[in-house]
Image: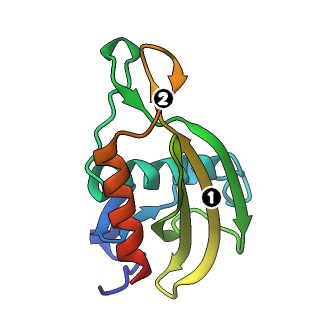
């Protein structure tokens, strides 16, 4: 995969899927993500993680969540989120976020997003988030359905090989 040139008009995007196995998402940093000095506000990193996580759910393990609780079914809200910052991000930077599955338990799984700045692929940040399987009707944690657990395990096994 060729690196994205931040000056390239084709790279004029908010975020886009670059690969499915592992899930890789490219995202352009917007001026609105930044303080007046042009450095990304810390809370925006939660949005970056969530974007990569949503791409992972759809493209990596083929799970489509519905946002409305009245629709029933399950969803995977965040239980924990931690960051390890490696460099500043500024407006117009382009980052590449790679999603890895680091743990799977009966009711939850943990993802790690490794973000690098393009085009040089210098480390930008790591984010680790744990998602809990929640029954939207009961409003309580439940076991991850077998087919989703199998998809998570397949993805994790593929990234380890």
Q: Quadrant of residue 127?
A: bottom right
Q: Residue at x 37, y 79 (%)?
A: 4
Which quadrant is the N terminus positioned in?
bottom left
The disc at residue 128 is 1
Q: Residue at x 42, y 68 (%)?
A: 156
Q: Position of residue 140 (x, y in %)?
A: 54, 22
Q: Residues within 10 Å of mark 2 (few under 14, many from 20)?
A: many
28 left or right, relative to 80: left
Q: Is residue 112 visible?
A: yes
Q: Residues within 10 Å of mark 1 (few under 14, many from 20)?
A: some
**In front: 80, or 98?**
80
97 left or right, relative to 20: right
Which quadrant is the C terminus positioned in?
bottom left
Q: Secondary structure at mark 1?
A: strand
Q: Secondary structure at mark 2?
A: strand
**In front: 135, or 97?**
135
Q: Position of residue 56 (x, y in %)?
A: 37, 55
Reply above or below: 138 against 85.
above
1 left or right, relative to 111: left
How many numbered tags mark residues here?
2
Query: How far separated are the C-alphas under marks 2 and 1?
Result: 19 Å
Q: Is residue 24 visible?
A: no
The disc at residue 134 is 2
């Amino acid at each position: 995969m060729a690196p994205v040139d931040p000056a390239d008009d084709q790279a004029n995007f908010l975020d886009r899927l670059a690969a499915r196995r592992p899930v890789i998402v490219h995202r352009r940093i917007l001026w609105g993500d930044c303080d007046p000095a042009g450095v990304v506000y810390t809370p925006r990193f939660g949005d970056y993680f969530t974007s990569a996580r949503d791409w992972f759910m759809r493209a990596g393990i083929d799970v489509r969540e519905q946002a409305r609780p009245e629709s029933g079914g399950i969803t995977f809200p965040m239980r924990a989120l931690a960051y390890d910052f490696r460099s500043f991000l500024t407006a117009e930077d382009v980052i590449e976020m790679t999603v890895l599955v680091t743990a799977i338990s009966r009711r939850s799984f943990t993802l790690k997003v490794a973000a690098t700045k393009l085009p040089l692929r210098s480390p930008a940040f790591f984010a680790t988030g744990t998602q809990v399987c929640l029954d939207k009707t009961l409003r309580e944690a439940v076991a991850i359905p077998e087919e989703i657990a199998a998809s998570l395990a397949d993805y994790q096994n593929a990234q380890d090989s």
